[in-house]
Image (cartoon, rainbow, N blue to C red):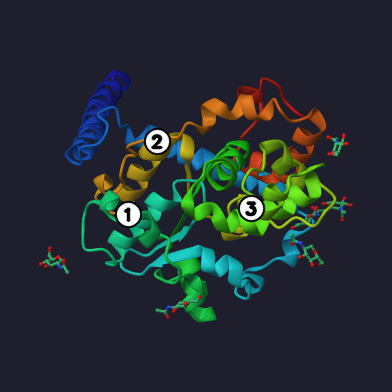
Amino acid sequence: MANIKILKLSMVSLIVVCGICSYLYLSLVDKSRDYGVATDFDPMLEQMVYLDRQEHLNKMCRLYLKNNSSKHTIDDLTTDVELLEHILVDLNHRLLYCYVPKVACTNWKRVFMILTGLANTSDALSIPAHVAHKRGIFLTLNNFTVPEIKYMLSNYRKFLFVRHPFERLLSAYRNKFDQNHVRSSYFQSRFGRYIIKNYRTNASKMSLEKGDDVTFVEFAAYLTGPENVTFNEHWKPISDLCRPCLLKYDFIGKYETLYTDSEYLLKLSGLLSSTFPHLTKPSTTSAQLRTYFSMLSQNVITQLYNIYYMDFKIFNYDLEGILGFEIG
Ligand SMILES: *[C@@H]1O[C@H](CO)[C@@H](O)[C@H](O)[C@H]1NC(C)=O
Ligand SMILES: *[C@@H]1O[C@H](CO)[C@@H](O)[C@H](O)[C@H]1NC(C)=O
Ligand SMILES: *[C@@H]1O[C@H](CO)[C@@H](O)[C@H](O)[C@H]1NC(C)=O
Ligand SMILES: *[C@@H]1O[C@H](CO)[C@@H](O)[C@H](O)[C@H]1NC(C)=O
Ligand SMILES: *[C@@H]1O[C@H](CO)[C@@H](O)[C@H](O)[C@H]1NC(C)=O
Ligand SMILES: *[C@@H]1O[C@H](CO)[C@@H](O)[C@H](O)[C@H]1NC(C)=O
């Protein structure tokens, strides 16, 4: 008899608990709808995806850097000017953004201008790209004292956006060498001429002077070749640019899910998710990946893979879906 009573009681409480849960869940979902984002937004499911990314990164960092980690501490970081200048600071919303060129960095810088009050608009796309890229407009960690840097690193929300390493590399090549952007002239004279001189037999006088017709094969030969390579921020591995194994970012966004991730992050920070602009012209790089990489030898692809090895591992990318085969 007593058992049945207890059973009844626990069933009733189960029903009550379930009711409260679904009420809370529905009100969360409703709230997300208020922001006017995708209607299939599921906060719990999304959160799982982001936690998985962080967990994977931590696992890989432990695996690959276990012998090294003791040598690199937060104290070393506070003297690493290049890293500090890569991390933008939003004091109002307590955000730190490690910007990675070729991963929606222009749009995130535009959003940062709005968040930090540098732009007097709510329409990010109305901010010209060259304004968002102007040197010295943002506060970076380099503008702060060591105790301030340490405080922000442990109390602010740190985030970055990543992308398939080969897609990012191809995007950098296409943007700086392949398409005749006005702003590519720096890259053509700084790198293009050097690459043609060292990696093209019988280069024409004009190519040697202008450096404006570097092929993807030559660019890849330069990156993997015996000459001294300079890893400009546009093609430097993200693991070197942002040091994710040491900085323990709170949020890892991916280019492949750019809008969902950006809107989630803004919402998480109590901001309007609509601040993040949607591109008018989607990137065509991913569709061209196979074409460009089929020009490279297996050996060069393997060497490129080794250069971006940590980015592949810690951000969980592979070659299968891109090239149709896997390395190592
Ligand atoms: C230590 O780190 C450096 C770069 O940070 C890397 O080149 C080297 O392979 C690492 N060594 C080990 C044993 O992980
Ligand atoms: C790295 O650490 C492991 C143990 O964690 C050790 O067995 C190995 O010899 C170390 N490798 C180097 C290059 O120090
Ligand atoms: C900036 O925005 C405020 C409020 O929307 C407006 O009153 C002001 O005129 C704007 N300033 C400029 C320089 O556009
Ligand atoms: C922040 O530091 C940069 C150099 O890293 C400097 O150019 C800029 O003027 C500084 N900004 C402020 C507000 O101090
Ligand atoms: C380079 O140019 C020279 C003379 O114009 C020519 O004889 C030679 O065959 C060319 N070599 C290659 C690899 O095209
Ligand atoms: C390669 O290294 C040499 C000597 O260190 C330097 O003079 C040259 O400018 C470097 N080339 C590039 C493209 O960085």
Sequence-first tag of 3 and 2: 2
328 or 209, nearer to the observer: 209
Local SS, label 3: helix
Q: Position of residue 174 (x, y in %)?
A: 56, 40
Neighbours of disc 1 within 10 Å: few (<14), some (14-19), many (20+): some
The residue type indicated by label 3 comes to Lys
Q: Earlier in the sequence, mark 2 or mark 1?
A: 2
Between marks 3 and 2, how big is the CA–CA gap?
Answer: 48 Å
Residue 75, labelled with which disc?
A: none
Q: Which residue is mark 2?
A: 46
Q: Amino acid at mark 2?
A: Glu
**Position of residue 224 in the picture relative to residue 322 (left or right):** right
* Residue found 40% across the figure and 41% down from its top: 261
Question: Which residue was labeled with disc 1?
Answer: 269
Q: Residues within 10 Å of mark 2 (few under 14, many from 20)?
A: some
Q: Can residue 27 be seen at all in this image of the molecule?
A: yes
Disc 3 designates what residue? 210
Given this view, does label 3 or label 1 mark the residue nearer the observer?
Answer: 3
Q: Amino acid at mark 1?
A: Ser
Q: x, y percentage for residue 198?
A: 80, 50
Please name whichever residue, 274 or 109, is drawn nearer the observer in this view of the structure.
Answer: 109
Q: Secondary structure at mark 2?
A: helix
Q: CB under 8 Å between callouts 2 and 1? A: no
**Tally of numbered tags:** 3
